[in-house]
Amino acid sequence: MAFGRGRGNKRTSTSSYASTITMVIFVALCVFGVWMLSSNSVIPPQITQGSTRAAVAETERSDVSASSNGNDEPEPTKQESDEQQAFEDNPGKLPDDAVKSEDEQRKSAKEKSETTSSKTQTQETQQNNDDKISEEKEKDNGKENQTVQESEEGQMKKVVKEFEKEQKQQRDEDAGTQPKGTQGQEQGQGKEQPDVEQGNKQGQEQDSNTDVTFTDATKQEQPMETGQGETSETSKNEENGQPEEQNSGNEETGQQNEEKTTASEENGKGEKSMKDENGQQEEHTTAEEESGNKEEESTSKDENMEQQEERKDEKKHEQGSEASGFGSGIPKESAESQKSWKSQATESKDEKQRQTSESNTVERIMDGNAWVLCNATAGTDYIPCLDNEEAIMKLRSRRHFEHRERHCPEDPPTCLVPLPEGYKEAIKWPESRDKIWYHNVPHTKLAEVKGHQNWVKVTGEFLTFPGGGTQFIHGALHYIDFLQQSLKNIAWGKRTRVILDVGCGVASFGGFLFERDVIAMSLAPKDEHEAQVQFALERKIPAISAVMGSKRLPFPSRVFDLIHCARCRVPWHNEGGMLLLELNRMLRPGGYFVWSATPVYQKLEEDVQIWKEMSALTKSLCWELVTINKDKLNGIGAAIYQKPATNECYEKRKHNKPPLCKNNDDANAAWYVPLQACMHKVPTNVVERGSKWPVNWPRRLQTPPYWLNSSQMGIYGKPAPRDFTTDYEHWKHVVSKVYMNEIGISWSNVRNVMDMRAVYGGFAAALKDLQVWVMNVVNINSPDTLPIIYERGLFGIYHDWCESFSTYPRSYDLLHADHLFSKLRTRCNLVPVMAEVDRIVRPGGKLIVRDESNVIREVENMLKSLHWDVHLTFSKHQEGILSAQKGFWRPETSQ
């Protein structure tokens, strides 16, 4: 009978009632009792909180209150009753008043009770009997359902108000327990948003708990982060493997299926275990059966997640992820993509082997007292891989400037670099291009030596930069325009976008190229020209500390549109032209080499000899001398060479000197690879990288490179061109929806940015309209995508984060690490990595980390031990995001 469903769909018989009332009374009153109970006293099905929410129709929701049978269970809705057809005795459609609200039912009962007292007596008798059955079942199950009588609006406000208090209780819910006082809230929300709540509950069981921590600076974004918005809720369901269509169809499907489900109330997670085909279930469930049901439920969910993983990723992209974007993410790297992409580690012949860390634990530094100051001769300017005096002293020769190259300590340092006395927060861009605080970089040697050439001057508490250089004492902008006038085809900011400035000095040339929409990788060694690269970085101009010595520079082949050298003291003609051949490797076919040095325009004996040797060398390289022009204002001249775009000249040379490199020589191998006095052929196949010039800037930023083949799988498992576009769209969404507004960063204070694990450069591309530049770092053991980054008009470098980066301390305003640390844990200890992060970020600078939840917690603990201000942490589905800011704290002790 219909009311029997509330007791597990067990069909009652006349014999079950004969034990409590006499057969004569039952037979006499049976007809009246059935009619009254089916009309007014239908016992609601005894299901769990989660399945109750899933079954309530969106358009007709009834208040959850104490039902007529004494169990604190919600009444079924009209839609649920109308669609009920799975009873064994098939009673057909229930009467209309069987789905009335509680108030209407009581009113109807009162009216009918006035008509006949015998009917009421029968109802009370039957009700008492049902109460006994209910009490017995409640005793066996050991469960008590709570009554909720709060309105929809009141419930939502209460959830928002108490969300922050419940953050610490999320782990208890994930373990299957429910904090006291929250059951009623969840029942109320289940009445209002059944599908969403069911998906969220299941997601909490399967994945790590959603854990959000806000500081005062970011609390205003809290409602969005908690998933209150409609878009966020829908996305949560999809990420839990329950698309919206599936949730909305749960009511109809579950009610029409003959295999009725009962909820496991003990775990309180809203999941179902299927009955047998006969629809029969024992009233008393043993603990062993319940345990088995839990295992079946877990297996079923895992299979469901695997089947819907692909659809889930597509839906997240189509719907713009969540409202907040914190839970969004591009798919993880495809294992198959590893077959299609080489890494820098495999390309480099003499890659330096790294030792796996003995342990990834960080307990020893969690108290914040284990950090010590570095006791290095370099002091506040310490660069571990360039100031390794022990390794430098062991060098047999310094002929090729080996002592200026990278020599990293075997054990990466975990000490912290001290701050210069009187250090202040860096001046903002663009004012920083003209002046910086003297105490931040307290070096005066360049001002003393190069002051008359307008490099740098000491002006009170500032170091000022008039914008000049040895070759452009009247300003860099005039010099930049002079080069454009010398060769119109340079086309700054259109054809020419990414350049390499060798021997950059204080990088004024690169600093003023921003006004022409050009970015320059400025390069100079850490040498007797004290702190020239440090000056550049403090001015907020991109630069790295490196030297052209005995090894290749850490850049791919054929990527720079133009290479510039203004009176740089590089002996290009020595060693068979080995250094110039390294420029040839990095220069794009058809690209230009601008050389404005004294041999171009002076007639001193030494200069004449250098010009003669340089002319012979460039001719043997098939470089065409396009023009030699003289700047009367500065009194200097510039020679502009162009690299050939075909192999025709190479094949016509009379002498094979310098020789062509062997066919198996990988021009892209650049990590600790020795220089060779040979040159590589120009690609001739139209689908090879370097056979064509990229489209003009800014169109090249979002255009997939022509040499990305659709038959090649991208990093995230899609055809490479589509993978490129998907990555770009993803980062545009994350940057605009999350990074710009929700993580407590004032972007007006950000200029120098590093993406510690760039893939296609999508993060940097999404920042195009901001006044920032981004150093894209491609890890040596990751797919070699750095050529793609250059192709789209951005720049970057190869690096291994198990070593220190070649830059001065306090260089960057913002570091961004997307799933970097979880990949590093298998290769090196995270403690020295975090010490390196602390070294290169300025006081007041920021760090954004997106990674696995357990890694986020580990990084957060280390940052707190470093006295960083953690603005926000957010974890969901075993993924998380963290935003933190470095302070001025330094330990008092040293090594």
Image (tube, rainbow, N blue to C red):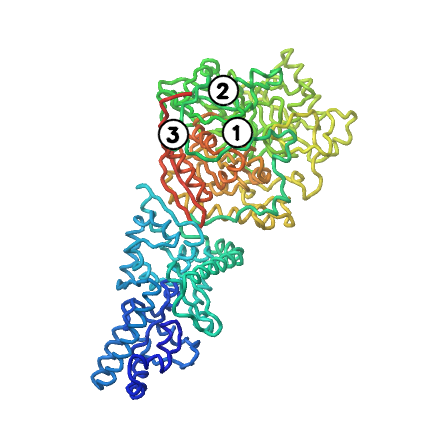
Residue 773 rendering spot, x and y as whole percentages: 48, 35
Is 504 situated left or right of 880 in this image?
right
Q: Quadrant of residue 563?
A: top right
Q: Label 1 vs label 3: CA separation?
A: 22 Å
Which of the marked residues, 2 or 3, is nearer the chain's N terminus? 2
Q: For the residue carrying disc 1, how many other residues have a C-alpha within 10 Å: few (<14), some (14-19), or many (20+)?
A: many
Question: Along the line of sight, which residue is nearer the eye, 408 or 485?
Answer: 408
Is 436 situated left or right of 503 in this image?
left
- Total marks shown come to 3
Q: For the residue carrying disc 2, how many other residues have a C-alpha within 10 Å: few (<14), some (14-19), or many (20+)?
A: some
Which of the marked residues, 2 or 1, is nearer the chain's N terminus? 2
Residue type, label 2: Ile
- Residue furthest left as drawn: 114
Residue 8 rendering spot, x and y as whole percentages: 39, 71
Residue type, label 1: Glu
| Residue 470 visible somewhere in the drawing | yes
Residue 388 higher or lower than 92, as above or below = above
Q: Which residue is mark 3?
A: 843
Q: Nearer the viewer, mark 2 or mark 3?
A: 3
Q: Which residue is mark 2?
A: 473
Which of the marked residues, 1 or 3, is nearer the chain's N terminus? 1
Residue 803 is labelled as 1
